[in-house]
Image: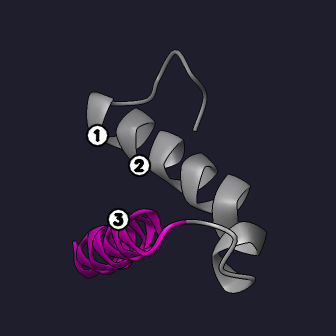
Amino acid sequence: MTLASATDEELLAAAAQAVVAAFREDTTRQHLPPTAIAALRLLETALILYQDRRTDR
């Protein structure tokens, strides 16, 4: 995927993956408030479901 050929959906998924990756270590060490950890876990789960649906196409 190149930036020029990416769909809005793909760009959003890539941005979400970057956010999850940036905070992964802090999440596992629980340096974040519980609500932030929950939000990141929700985002991570949504990404997994998104990737699964793209694979099924």
Report x, y in % for residue 8. Answer: 29, 29
**Mark before the other along the chain sequence, 3 or 1:** 1
Instruction: Determine if the magenta segment contains residue 19.
Output: no
Q: Secondary structure at mark 3?
A: helix
Residue 46 placement, left or right of 51: left
Most foreground residue, 28 or 5: 28
Report x, y in % for residue 28. Answer: 69, 84
Instruction: Determine if the magenta segment contains residue 37.
Output: yes
Q: Residues within 10 Å of mark 1 (few under 14, many from 20)?
A: few
Most foreground residue, 10 or 47: 47
Kind of residue at disc 3: Ala
Residue 6 placement, left or right of 3: left
Query: Which mark is drawn over residue 13?
Result: 2
Q: Secondary structure at mark 2?
A: helix
User: Residue shown at 33%/30% (left/top)?
Assistant: 7
Q: Residues within 10 Å of mark 3 (few under 14, many from 20)?
A: few
Most foreground residue, 29 or 43: 29
- Pointers 2 and 3 in contact (C-beta within 8 Å): no
Query: Which mark is drawn over residue 37?
Result: none
Q: Secondary structure at mark 1?
A: helix
Q: Disc 3 designates what residue?
A: 39
Magenta range is 33-57
Kind of residue at disc 2: Ala
The label nearer to you, 2 versus 3, is 3
Q: How many numbered callouts?
A: 3
